[in-house]
Image (cartoon, helix red, strand yellow):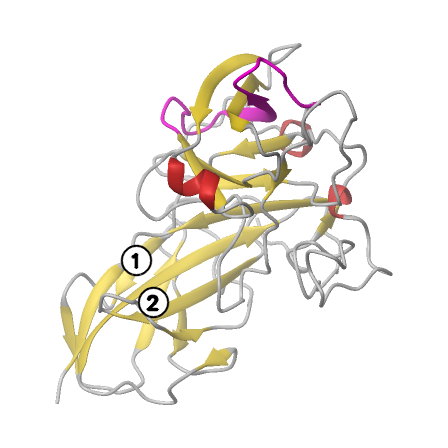
C-alpha cells in the first residue's frame, strides 16, 4: 500500500485513538515501531496539587537532535520521555496504562526520581515499558507525587503502538566500503502499512557519536517485502561532512507515517508552544492535534576504507 504526504497529522481530542481507528489491534509483526501522540502545550498548576507532568516535546524526524517519545533501535519496547517538574518536594511519578481494549487506565508503574534528576529540574526522564508487546496499542498517563502523598492532576494521554522495523540491505554489519559517499539500501519487511517517509542517519563510531548526516524525509521507492529504497550519503538534509573520511561509522534508517495524512511540515514537534519551542509557529495546529508513527532499525556499524 502506498501513501503520500508528510509526517504531521491532525487528530481530534486530547486523548488519541488514531491506531485503533485504522485497525492496528491484533496486527502481529516480527519487529517494532512506535506510534506516539502527544500534547506539549504549557501545563498549568493546580493550587492544591503538584504541577501536571509534561511530556518531552518531539522534534521533526529529520532534525539533527532527537527528542520526545519514540521508537528505539535497541529493543522492541515502548520508550517514553517526560520532563522533571519544578516542585521542590517532588518525589516521583505514577504511570497509568491501559490497552486499547480497556475502558479505563490503572496504575502500572511507579518511578522514583534519582538525586541527580532532582538536582536537575527540567531534565528528561526516560522510562521503558518492558511489558509492551509488538502489535499492541497502549495509552499512558502520568501523575507526579511527593513524599507527603500529594499528587498532581493527570497529564495528557500518550498513545503508543508497535509495528515492524525496516529491513537493512547495505552497508551490512561491519561491511567495508570504498566510496566516501556510500549508498544505503533498505526496505520494508512486509507491506509497509502506514509508512509515508524515511530518514537515514549517519554518526561517527566514537564515544560522542557525532551526527554527520541526516537525510531529508523522502517516500519509499517500494512498499512491499523485497523492494529496496536507496539513497547516497550527503544527498540533501543536514550534512556536517560532505564526504566520509576513512574510518568507522554507524547508520540507521527510520520509517515515519501519520494518520490521517495532512501536509504539515512543522519546525518543531511543539508547533504551538512558543515558550518551550522558540521556533514554533503559533498559526499551525496545536500539539494535541498531532499524531506520530515511527520505527527505527538497529544501528549498523560500517567502515570506509582508505
Q: Decide if residue 198 is on the left or right side of residue 249.
A: right
What distance separates the C-alpha of mark 1 from that of mark 2?
Answer: 7 Å
How crowded pointer 1 is (Cα within 10 Å; few <14, some 14-19, many 20+) is rated as many
Rendering coords of residue 133 (x, y %): 40, 25
Q: Is residue 177 above or below residue 208?
A: below
- Residue 53 lies in quadrant: top right
Residue 137 magenta: yes
- Residue 113 lies in quadrant: top left
Disc 2 marks which residue? Answer: 185
The residue lying toward the viewer, choosing from 69 and 76, is 69
**Labels in figure, total:** 2
Disc 1 marks which residue? Answer: 168
Residue shown at the point (42%, 66%) measured from the top left: 200
Sequence-first disc among 1 and 2: 1
Q: In this view, does 7 lie above or below 291?
A: below
Q: Is residue 130 above or below residue 262?
A: above
What is the secondary structure assignment of the residue under circle 2?
Answer: strand
Residue shown at the point (74%, 57%) measured from the top left: 275
Rendering coords of residue 20 (x, y %): 64, 27
The region drawn magenta spans 129-153
Which of the image's four quarters has the C terminus? bottom left
How crowded pointer 2 is (Cα within 10 Å; few <14, some 14-19, many 20+) is rated as some
What is the secondary structure assignment of the residue under circle 1?
Answer: strand
Residue shown at the point (69%, 54%) measured from the top left: 270
Rendering coords of residue 76 (x, y %): 35, 36
Marks 1 and 2 close (CB-CB < 8 Å): yes
- Residue 273 lies in quadrant: bottom right
The residue lying toward the viewer, choosing from 274 and 129, is 274
Residue shown at the point (32%, 39%) measured from the top left: 75
Q: In this view, does 25 lie above or below 107?
A: below
Q: Decide if residue 255 is on the left or right side of residue 282.
A: left
**Which of the numbered marks, if any, corresponds to residue 98?**
none
Amino acid at each position: 500500500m502506498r501513501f503520500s504526504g508528510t509526517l504531521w497529522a491532525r487528530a481530534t481530542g486530547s486523548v488519541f485513538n488514531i491506531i485503533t481507528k485504522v485497525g492496528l489491534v491484533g496486527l502481529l509483526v516480527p519487529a517494532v515501531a512506535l506510534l506516539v501522540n502527544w500534547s506539549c502545550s504549557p501545563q498549568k498548576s493546580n493550587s492544591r496539587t503538584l504541577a501536571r507532568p509534561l511530556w518531552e516535546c518531539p522534534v521533526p524526524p529529520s532534525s539533527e537532535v532527537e527528542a520526545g517519545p519514540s521508537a528505539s533501535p535497541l529493543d522492541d519496547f515502548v520508550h517514553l520521555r517526560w520532563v522533571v517538574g519544578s516542585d521542590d518536594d517532588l518525589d516521583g511519578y505514577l504511570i497509568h496504562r491501559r490497552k486499547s481494549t480497556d475502558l479505563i487506565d490503572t496504575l502500572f508503574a511507579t518511578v522514583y526520581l534519582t538525586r541527580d534528576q532532582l538536582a536537575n529540574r527540567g531534565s528528561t526522564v526516560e522510562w521503558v515499558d518492558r511489558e509492551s508487546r509488538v502489535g499492541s496499542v497502549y495509552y499512558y498517563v502520568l501523575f507526579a507525587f511527593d513524599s507527603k502523598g500529594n499528587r498532581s492532576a493527570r497529564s495528557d494521554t500518550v498513545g503508543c503502538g508497535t509495528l515492524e522495523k525496516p529491513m537493512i540491505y547495505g552497508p551490512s554489519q561491519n561491511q567495508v566500503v570504498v566510496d566516501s559517499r556510500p549508498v544505503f539500501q533498505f526496505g520494508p519487511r512486509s507491506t509497509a502499512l502506514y509508512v509515508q517517509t524515511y530518514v537515514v542517519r549517519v554518526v561517527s563510531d566514537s564515544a560522542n557519536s557525532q551526527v554527520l548526516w541526516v537525510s531529508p524525509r523522502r517516500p519509499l521507492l517500494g512498499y512491499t517485502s523485497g523492494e529496496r529504497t536507496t539513497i547516497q550519503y550527503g544527498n540533501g538534509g543536514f550534512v556536517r561532512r560532505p564526504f566520509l573520511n576513512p574510518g568507522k561509522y554507524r547508520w540507521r534508517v527510520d520509517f515515519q507515517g501519520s494518520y490521517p495524512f495532512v501536509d504539515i511540515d512543522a519546525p518543531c514537534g511543539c508547533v504551538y508552544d512558543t515558550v518551550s519551542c522558540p521556533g514554533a509557529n503559533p498559526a499551525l495546529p496545536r500539539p494535541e492535534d498531532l499524531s506520530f508513527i515511527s520505527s527505527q532499525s538497529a544501528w549498523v556499524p560500517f567502515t570506509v576504507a582508505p
